[in-house]
Image (spheres, rainbow, N blue to C red):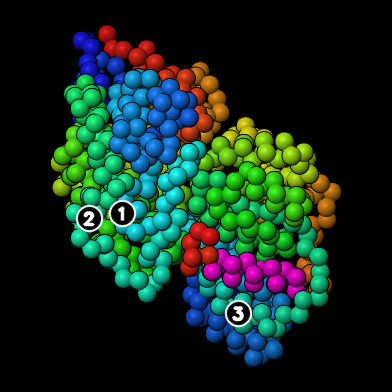
Amino acid sequence: MEQMTSKQRFLAGLYGDPVDRPPAASIVSVITYELMDITGAHFPHANIEPEPMATLAAGAHEVMGFDSVMPIFSIAQEATALGCQVDWSDTDMMPNPTDSPWADRDVEIKLPDGFPDSFLEDKYVKCAIDAIRLLKQHFGDEVMVLGKVMGPWTLSYHCYNTQEFLFDTIMDPDRVRKSLETLAPVPLAYAAAQIEAGADAIVWADHATGDLVRNTMYRDYLLPHHQELIPQVEAPVILHCCGKTLDRVQYFSEAGFTCYHFESANPPDEMVEKAAGKMKLTGNVNNPVTLYARGPDEARAEAQAAIDAGVDIIAPECAVPLQAPVANLQAIVQTCKDNRHQ
Amino acid sequence: MSREEEIKKGLFDHTLVGEADEVVELTQEGIDLGMDPLDILFGALIPSLQEVGRLFEIGEYFVPEMLVAARAMQGAMALLRPLLVDKGAEPIGKVVMLTVKGDVHDIGKNLCNIMLEGEGFDIVDLGVNVKPEEVVAAVQEHQPQLLGFSAFLTTTMPFFKSNLAALSEAGLRDSVKVMVGGAPVTPEYADSVGADGFAPDASAAVRLAKKLMVDMGYDVSMGGDDSEGASALTTAVQAVEELMVKSGKHDE
């Protein structure tokens, strides 16, 4: 089969079309300290300024060889624009929201005044959109440019406080529903802006994970929102949800996602069996043990296991630890190249 | 079944499903009837919390169910606390608990604190986003037998290793046993970074902590006389109240 461009390969994997070899992707974040040194784009600048953000993201393709690039490394862009406190200054860790405006039950659950314009003009939100624009200009149609948004469940963790939100899933369902309904327009607006800037697909992170809540929480609270929201996104949408999720993949597949990015807590063959014919899959090379603590041989073995199981796009399972060696990530790509179809 | 037995059964059942009003009412009735506060605690509330932990371990319960049970217990603690006479018994061990640098997730750590304190451990909670140098300083200051590291993100788990390296550099690694846990953490990962043990949840953390204490030659038996029970009650009250305060303030 003729050699495909990275974007052609990724899209073919996403839609189940023939590929010259399995796509290898940066779905969430493959950024590492070593990649920062190679590209010259470091934290915190690469989280808050478009040019270094795009430069670092481009390293996923230009240094590691992945078929996609994705410049939104942390989970905090939307959170700041929605009123959460985030420390963006650290040079050696991902930014995280540290304060939740709706944790105070006397505070009304509502979006900031002027949404969506004020949201899209927020410094950190705009930075990511501009970085996507730069990546699109740089790569054109050669490489898949991914955007990333947080869905209403994950935004609720940030705005409402994770512990309070989980508590209220049982004790105050109306307030939980209010939070989800209020936040639902945020990923839609952010995704539309990213697509306008050049994103070829959107990663939608919504962590209703089996590590925290039972599968019926996803079905009853979040699935109706996903079913309403996802068809409105004018690009393929890849769901990211960490942890054990085999018991809710059926529900994910009813939400309209094109693809699901899953973790190593779920054996790839079992995940493929659950998702077969319903949505495509990407994943699931283990981060903390394999990509961080082990070597290229182990990374190759796990990537091969995912290929053999029938995973459509091969990728690390979640945001890669910053300390992981670049060679381990390159090993994933090399494994995909070694599986070139004749 | 006597009314006292019915009350204990009711406390167990209502705590299990987080029915706070019923737990408070039954606790007050038990006090009015002259029931021993320690019997209410160890005959009903602590066993219910242990059952919550067991149900979590086998996948019947998830985090929300654990949170509502802990909060239901808090109402009972508010009534029992004034009746407590702390006779000054020594805790069975000291544990410094923390969520690692870069990570602000503390629900799992807080639940571990409750279970550990309920079992008689003295807990020093360093909170979230704790830097390696702060870990070293805390070990020097508090001299615990055990250290507990929690991480919820695959991006922050490597700080287990950073913390252990910092302890080694400070010459403190052999002075404490280190337990690690968190949603993405595996026994294999715990081994790879050189931790002394891994616990997947709060109940397992209690078992691991006791095992490590025994390995170090400590006696971890407790219960029996009132002084030890009273100490456990104190720590359980403090732990539940601490969780409730934190749940309102999120990451401190």
The residue to which callout 2 is attached is: A118
Q: Nearer the viewer, mark 3 or mark 1?
A: 1
In the image, which is nearer the foreground, mark 3 or mark 2? 2
Say if labels 3 and 2 share a chain.
no
What amino acid does circle 2 point to? Answer: Ser
Q: Are marks 3 and 2 in contact (CB under 8 Å)?
A: no
Report whether A71 appears left or right of B218: left
* Tag of residue B78: 3
Residue in the picture at 42% in, 39% down? A44
The relative height of residue A44 versus residue A299 in the rendered view (above or below) is: below
Q: Point out the stretch of residues depicted in magenta.
A: B230-245
Q: Quadrant of the N terminus of chain A?
A: top left
Is the same chain shared between marks 2 and 1? Answer: yes
Q: Secondary structure at mark 2?
A: helix
The reply to whether the C-beta atoms of the residues labelled 2 and 1 are less than 8 Å apart is yes
Q: Which residue in the protein does label 1 denote?
A: A81
